[in-house]
Image (cartoon, helix red, strand yellow):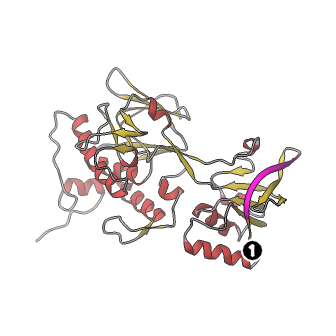
Amino acid sequence: MSNTPIETDAVIIGAGPVGLFQVFELGLLEIKAHVIDSLPEVGGQCIELYPDKPIYDIPAIPVCTGRELTNNLLKQIEPFNAQFHLGQEVSKLERQADGRFLVSTSLDNHFLSKSVFIAGGVGAFQPRTINIEGIDAFVGKQVFYHVKNPEQFTGKRIVICGGGDAALDWAIHFSEIASSVTLIHRRDDFKAAPKSIARMRELCANKQMNLLIGQVTGYEVRGDRLAEIAFTNIDGEAKQIPLDDLLVFYGLSPKLGPIAEWGLNIDRKQICVDTEKFQTSIPGIYAVGDINVYPGKKKLILSGFHEAALAAFAAAAYLNPEKQIQLQYTTTSPKLHKALGVKSPTFE
């Protein structure tokens, strides 16, 4: 992307469920949005932490997984053609003389936006890294915290660290295509879907995967390649494990990051907002979802959806102060039907 800023009505920081629904609510009000997220794919915690775990408290959906919820939200916002800018963190936000906000990212992309919606969950998520001195030199080469191209691990000797959904899901997946898979977890207790745990144990029993209880304590290098990792079990016994690639899924660590420097009113790493507009202490900047705080706040996806709706109406009034914003219903409004690309029903 060129360093010339993209001009837009709205920038949404965060592509989790609330950020995606914010696209929808803004779209209904004819406000186009660009979405920025530090993660490499949309979905936020739903995709990174519990993609296949059931969610039971989404209205009118008795049960869905995090992945299903994300996919349904993406389908819902298709008519509004939101532009996504993933794998980059918003590093700077500065108000300009004309009232717009210059939003800059860690990839040196820039946006001039009339409004900003912070929907970053509890902050920008960063993978929890493996704490072994010097191993960072192999990140992106043989050490990975995300899987972007599963096929690159075909025929490889893979060691996977972690005990959650991501670790087990990928271990199960790679058991079909890798030369060998060794799963390492600090204890024989897993925070993953019961079905995944059962499948992992079945694969171990059939010698299609190895499970080791303990932790990685070091590594060996041959030439410029990571050749072995040192493993120590819970009894203190050590062994060397040859490998081609190390995949680490220790979960995500939320960090407020640069948001703390934007001059917003913050209470215990959460952004203070009102409950009428969900506006921050800076007019034109709104905060929705888990990152905000107000009296009675409940950290539910449902609450974030409600906040996104009110923030969108507030932004519409902020962007067009001379225009009266009418509340319209998707059931009956021809204007909204047109925006959504659906045919207006005929009521008799």
Q: Main secondary structure of the magenta part?
A: strand
Image coordinates of residue 130 in percent, x first then y, are 69, 49
Residue, far left? 348
Q: Give the amino acid type for the residue marked by disc 1 in the picture.
A: Gln
Query: Pointer 1: residues within 10 angstroms few (<14), some, or many (20+)?
Result: some
- Residue 247 placement (x, y as % from top left): 69, 55
In this rendered view, identify the residue nearer to me: 336 or 24.
Answer: 24
Relative to 48, 307 lies left or right: left
Q: Nearer the viewer, residue 260 or 310?
A: 260
Question: Residue pushed farthest right?
Answer: 223
Q: Is residue 168 left or right of residue 343?
A: right
Tell me what residue is drawn at x 18 percent, y 53 percent.
Answer: 328
Q: Residue furthest top?
A: 97
Q: Is residue 267 magenta?
A: no
Percent from the top left, x then y, of residue 304? 34, 52
Task: State the residue position of label 1.
Answer: 208
**Highlighted magenta segment, given as a residue range:** 213-222
Residue drawn at 23 percent across, 54 percent down: 336
At x 13% / y 69%, what residue is drawn?
347
